[in-house]
Amino acid sequence: MVRGRQPCAGLTATPLLRSKVSAVVAFYPVVDFVPGKDMKARSRPYKAALGGFRGQERDYLYNLIDTFEWAYLGPGQSRTDPLLSPTHTDFHDLPKYVFTVGCELDMFAMEALKFMCKLSGREMPAVGNIVGRQEIGSEGELVTEGDERFAWEEIMDDGEVYRWLLVPDVVHGFDQDIIQLFAWLWRDRAMLTDARIKRDKVIDIVGQWLLEGPFKAGQNRERTQI
């Protein structure tokens, strides 16, 4: 199992790792360097009513996009290189289990959703759509069923399992220590409390999914071989 962000999904499709990795859990990954930053920034909701750090009119990552590209995009490298943009890889080379966690207030959420839709054969979001909803949820709330904007799972005929979870009202990196710094700078205790509750819930959901899916499947294969 590989847990991480870009470029973990692309790496698992390489010949070296293809047969060694059974699952990918991608937290708010960057999976497509083709769309420009303005298009990405328009694809998420902006909720001024949240106030504090989350209520900003511009995604806090917007001014960092050039740095992202400098760090990952080599001279002459195509933006559709599968190692850079897993959305453009041969999906048959990816692990059979993929769980992607998106952040509703993240300019990278739409490309992560499109990546999962391509994997699972689901209808792609229309151009101009935004992820999630404009309404604000309650503190610590996750939407895990009944609303496919936030959660769904597809089990394919060949056994592939693709899971999508969009965490409402959180920014990119909501599960990281950096959020404590943002909360302190903006005196936004509500953001920190909400993020901590959701982080713990997401960890539980992902852990259960791994135990019931990739881990269990691996045990069954071992028994069959014996």
Image: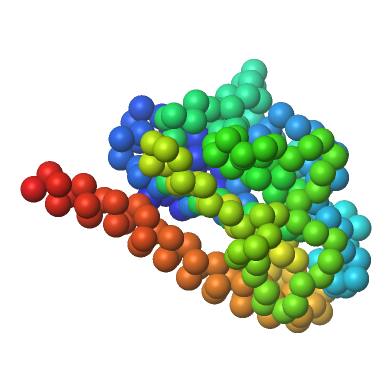
Q: Residue at x 42, y 38 (%)?
A: 157
In the figure, 24 relative to 158: above or below? below
Pick the front one: 211 or 30: 211
Residue found at the far top of this picture: 76
**In the picture provided, is 21 more to the left or to the right than 107?**
left
Residue 209 on image: x %, y %: 43, 60
Residue 188 on image: x %, y %: 79, 77
Answer whether residue 197 is visible to the viewer in this image.
Answer: yes
Answer whether residue 4 is visible to the viewer in this image.
Answer: no
How many discs appear?
0
Pick the front one: 89 or 157: 157
**In the picture provided, is 11 more to the left or to the right than 183?**
left
Residue found at the far left of this picture: 226
Residue 152 on image: x %, y %: 58, 54
**The quarter of the displayed image where residue 172 is located:** bottom right
Q: Residue at x 64, y 30 (%)?
A: 73
Q: Residue at x 66, y 34 (%)?
A: 32
Q: Residue at x 74, y 40 (%)?
A: 125
Residue 94 on image: x %, y %: 44, 35
Pick the front one: 186 or 168: 168
In the figure, 211 relative to 44: above or below? below
